Image (cartoon, coloured by chain):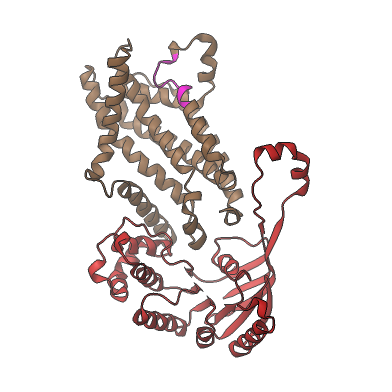
Chain colours: A brown, B red
């Protein structure tokens, strides 16, 4: 392997390690938090929707969590990515290295939490009288890959724009929140009244999240949805790369 | 080898951002005024041959650090061209990228990679680095427990052990206590004598004279003089005392 590639990979690995370990460095539970976080948020949602609100739907908790965990990977990463460039000014100005590694390390760090939530989903399928199916073996990696590129594109786009236009950070927080309620995560798509359903249908995240749910709950995979998600990833990646490369040239002047 | 060919660099002038109300009531004005530019470097050309050590002197705000960041490649010239051959090692800000909660050892590895090494290369030299820093007993503690002097010593030790080919130094030679300062000066001189190319920004005229083979004097973004250390430093000092208001 060429020395430069080797160094880039080493750097990515060490930045990712840092992203994962530093977060929990001074905590008593340490890395266990990666497992505790999804368990606890699953518990909170279970209590809120199943015990308090008594949402009447078959297998609701699994239904919701199978969408919630992938969504959290998306939203948490994008929200953190926005600040990767503005938050590492001295590194960017005083050292030369590929800046996109900062974004990738954030995504990788958050991916670990998603990976830790998969055993929780598996345990829950048994609770609901189902079991993990063979589709998980290729469905989960496939969806992870697609979503990885969507987040990466979003990360490049938002972090770079945020360097020039700091309002981005606040705008993206509102948008993510809005997008959350425009995606069928807490409720099924069919529950939305016909005349408003167009908002969900036009939202590309709907297809990705629905695909996650299909895989986890052992339904048939809708390959049209996968295709739409792949196209979305392609578009977001091209937009992100274009903006990132173009605005990168003058970034030192605004940081 | 470094060749800068008529390099210009401008920064947008940061005015106070107009509030939303001012912006709305004065839209035509804001659209018209365009962007104010501040030229930090104006038409700067020079060459540094392999093995040469170029000193850059000048007052605060003369453009020295801007020039260094252009040479490093962390920023691009607005106009003109810079050509560099060789691996650049920045000694611009010691400990850029250090993480407070990681141990000295972990920070050595991360910083070494950031400065252009592979992990294996850093690991091969890690004992030497720790030895040079003289921080053996603290190396596995998080660096937030370090004193600022220890922090700098660690950062400096990593930086000089990265096999530099082109070394860019921004006045950091006064690191640590007297003993460590002597050691770090010797280490830098050792590197320079080994034939690496160096660009050295400093306000300390005696070390400029001692280390550099040539000196560039920058003022207001332009080159005032380029020549032998003794001549240029002499001119710079006389000029500085001529108009007392702006003594460096």
- In the image, is B141 to the left or to the right of A16? left
The x and y percentages for residue A56 are 32, 10
Magenta run includes residue B241: no
Query: Depth check: A77 or B174 in front?
Result: B174
Q: Quadrant of residue B149?
A: bottom left
* Vertical order, B237 against A248 (above or below): below
Q: Which residues are magenta?
A: A179-189
Closest to the observer: B242 or A34?
Answer: B242
Q: In the image, residue A169 lies at what x, y percent?
A: 52, 40
Q: Position of residue A110 (x, y in %)?
A: 36, 40
Q: Nearer the viewer, residue A85 or B2?
A: A85
Q: Please state if A25 lies on the left or on the right of B173 as rendered.
A: left
* Residue B5, x across and y down, in percent: 68, 71
Q: Quadrant of residue A49?
A: top left
| Residue depicted at x 48% and y 36% | A150
Quadrant of image for the N terminus of chain B: bottom right
Residue A85 makes an appearance in the image: no
Quarter of the image holding residue B145?
bottom left
């Amino acid at each position: 392997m060429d020395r430069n590639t080797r160094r880039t990979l080493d750097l990515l690995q060490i930045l990712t390690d840092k992203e994962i370990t530093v977060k929990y460095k001074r905590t008593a539970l340490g890395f266990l938090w990666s497992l505790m976080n999804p368990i606890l948020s699953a518990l909170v949602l279970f209590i809120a929707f199943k015990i308090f609100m008594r949402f009447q739907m078959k297998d609701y908790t699994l239904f919701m969590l199978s969408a919630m965990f992938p969504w959290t990977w998306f939203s948490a990463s994008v929200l953190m990515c926005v600040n990767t460039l503005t938050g590492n000014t001295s590194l960017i100005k005083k050292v030369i290295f590929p800046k996109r590694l900062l974004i990738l390390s954030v995504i990788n760090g958050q991916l670990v939490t998603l990976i830790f939530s998969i055993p929780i989903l598996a345990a829950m399928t048994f609770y609901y009288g189902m079991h993990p199916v063979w589709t998980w073996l290729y469905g989960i990696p496939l969806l992870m890959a697609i979503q990885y590129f969507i987040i990466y594109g979003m990360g490049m786009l938002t972090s770079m724009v945020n360097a020039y236009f700091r309002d981005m950070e606040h705008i993206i927080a509102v948008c993510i929140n809005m997008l959350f309620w425009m995606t069928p995560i807490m409720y099924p798509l069919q529950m939305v009244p016909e005349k408003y359903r167009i908002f969900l249908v036009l939202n590309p995240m709907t297809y990705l999240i629905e695909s996650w749910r299909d895989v986890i709950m052992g339904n048939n995979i809708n390959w049209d949805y996968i295709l739409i998600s792949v196209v979305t990833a392609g578009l977001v990646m091209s937009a992100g790369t274009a903006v990132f490369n173009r605005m990168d040239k003058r970034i030192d002047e605004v940081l | 080898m470094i060749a800068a060919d008529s390099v210009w660099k401008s920064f947008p002038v940061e005015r106070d951002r107009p509030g939303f109300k001012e912006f709305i009531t004065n839209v035509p004005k804001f659209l018209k005024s365009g962007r104010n530019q501040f030229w930090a470097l104006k038409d700067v050309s020079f060459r540094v041959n392999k093995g040469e050590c170029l000193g850059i002197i000048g007052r605060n705000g003369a453009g020295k650090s801007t020039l260094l960041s252009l040479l490093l490649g962390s920023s691009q010239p607005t106009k003109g061209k810079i050509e560099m051959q060789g691996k650049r090692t920045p000694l611009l800000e010691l400990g850029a990228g250090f993480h407070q909660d990681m141990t000295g050892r972990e920070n050595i590895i991360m910083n070494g990679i950031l400065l252009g090494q592979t992990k294996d290369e850093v690991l091969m030299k890690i004992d030497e680095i720790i030895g040079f820093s003289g921080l053996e007993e603290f190396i596995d503690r998080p660096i937030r427990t370090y004193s600022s002097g220890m922090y700098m010593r660690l950062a400096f030790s990593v930086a000089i052990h990265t096999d530099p080919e082109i070394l860019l130094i921004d006045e950091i030679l006064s690191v640590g206590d007297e003993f460590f300062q002597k050691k770090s000066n010797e280490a830098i001189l050792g590197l320079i004598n080994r034939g690496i190319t160096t660009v050295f920004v400093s306000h300390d005229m005696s070390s400029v004279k001692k280390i550099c083979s040539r000196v560039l004097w920058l003022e207001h973004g332009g080159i005032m003089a380029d020549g032998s250390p003794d001549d240029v430093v002499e001119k710079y000092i006389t000029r500085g005392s001529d108009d007392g208001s702006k003594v460096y």
